[in-house]
Image: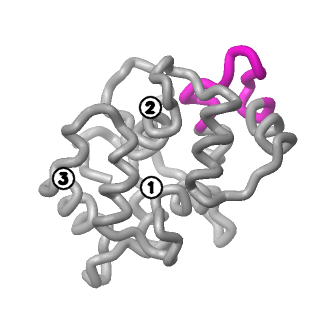
Amino acid sequence: MCPSGRIAIPITTTANSDFRPAFEIIDTDHDGKISSDDLRAFYAGIPSGENNDETMIGTMISVADANKDGFVEFDEFEKVLETTPFSRSGNGGDDGLMKDVFKVMDKDGDGRLSYGDLKSYMDSAGLAVTDDEIKSMIRLAGGDLNDGVSFDGLLKIFGC
């Protein structure tokens, strides 16, 4: 959500945006808007403490909060993602919000999302998914039950 200075890849979205699942994961209290508390809770799952910095969280909110009400509603979130650079190179650089989503979901830090990682995170985010739906996500992402899903695979799941 923070400007990176890199050239953004434009992403076309529709009223039925594929960014909705990502929004719902970050909106930890499920009130339809992302608050500073939601971002704190989201970043609490990332091993590095640098993302919990209050200044960074405040900056993220202010960059995305177009109507200046202190929250990021879905339309504001979507507009930010339309101009966020998504790297599919796997080079470990700053890959934006989706890379942070991946890090939170990758509980063991092995760089792959296992069946357990996906199921655990969907459950903790309050998204009711069946075992078959998790398996379908893994197949959609080009992974398998043994090796899991890469970062690029997660982008496929979210439609990026």
Compared to residue 138, the image places residue 3 above or below, namely below
Q: Is residue 144 depicted above or below 47 in this figure?
A: above
Stretch of the chain drawn in magenta: 139-154
Mark 3 burial class by Cα count in 10 Å: few <14, some 14-19, many 20+: some
C-alpha distance separating marks 1 and 3: 17 Å
Judged by depth in the image, the label closer to the viewer, 1 or 3, is: 3
- Distance from label 2 to label 3 (Cα)? 21 Å
Is residue 142 visible in this depiction of the protein? Answer: yes
Q: Is residue 111 above or below residue 86?
A: above
| Residue 146 inside the magenta-drawn segment | yes
For mark 2, what is the residue? Answer: 87
Q: Nearer the viewer, residue 74 or 5?
A: 74
Q: Position of residue 106 (x, y in %)?
A: 51, 31
Q: Residue at left 24%, top 43%?
A: 51
Mark 2 near mark 3, Cβ–Cβ under 8 Å?
Answer: no
Judge whether residue 144 is colored magenta: yes
Left or right position of 89 against 48:
right
Mark number for residue 127? none
Kind of residue indicated by mark 2: Ser
* Residue where numbered disc 1 is placed: 81
User: Residue 99: image x %, image y %?
Assistant: 43, 36
